[in-house]
Amino acid sequence: MCFYAMTYYKLHYACVSCRVSFKQHAYPQREHVCPNCSQPLICAGHDFAPPPRRDVRSWSVVAAVLGEGLRYEGLSVCGCGKEPKYRPRTRAELRVRRTVAARDGLLLSEALPRPDPLTPLTD
């Protein structure tokens, strides 16, 4: 069943400097700004689960993932996928993917979505 095709769902927007996230409608002509610091919010996708605000280490991983232009989305845009795509959750997982990207000459945005960093991604 196409969950995202049946109803219009709000997207998650995150401010990594304030460590907050909001669900807002995606208006292309409107810039989403953080109510705390007035900086632009980063679109985190439909399936973003923000870590607690006090968890600075997890937010540093979220900042690295969103900084590479990746979003927390399901297997397909329409929402038919049963599980979201892989994103690193700990700094150790992020460190391994950075090491593999530097060793193999990959972009970090290519190494981050791999569940196992040593095997190539097959989409």
Image (spheres, rainbow, N blue to C red):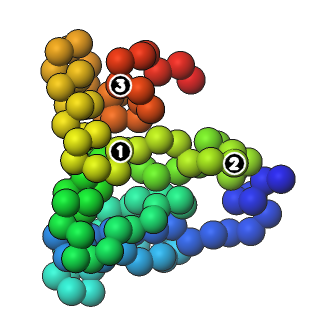
Apparent side of residue 52 relative to residue 39 in the rendered image (left or right): right
CB atoms of marks 3 and 2 within 8 Å: no
Apparent side of residue 61 relative to residue 9 in the rendered image (left or right): left
Q: How many marks?
A: 3
Give me the C-alpha separation between circle 3 and circle 2: 22 Å
Residue at image position (34%, 51%) is: 89
Q: Nearer the viewer, residue 10 or 90?
A: 90
Name the residue at the bottom extreme: 35
Q: Which residue is mark 1?
A: 88
Name the residue at the right extreme: 1
Q: Which residue is mark 3?
A: 117
CB atoms of marks 3 and 1 within 8 Å: no
Q: First in sequence, mark 3 or 1: give its number.
A: 1
Q: Position of residue 91 (x, y in %)?
A: 22, 47
**On screen, 43 above or below 53?**
above
Residue 82 has which mark? 2
Residue at image position (21%, 86%) is: 36
Residue at image position (69%, 48%) is: 82
Judged from the image, the secondary structure of the residue bearing numbered disc 3 is loop
Q: Nearer the viewer, residue 13 or 33?
A: 13
Amino acid type of the residue tagged 2 in the rendering: Lys
Q: Position of residue 115 (x, y in %)?
A: 44, 32
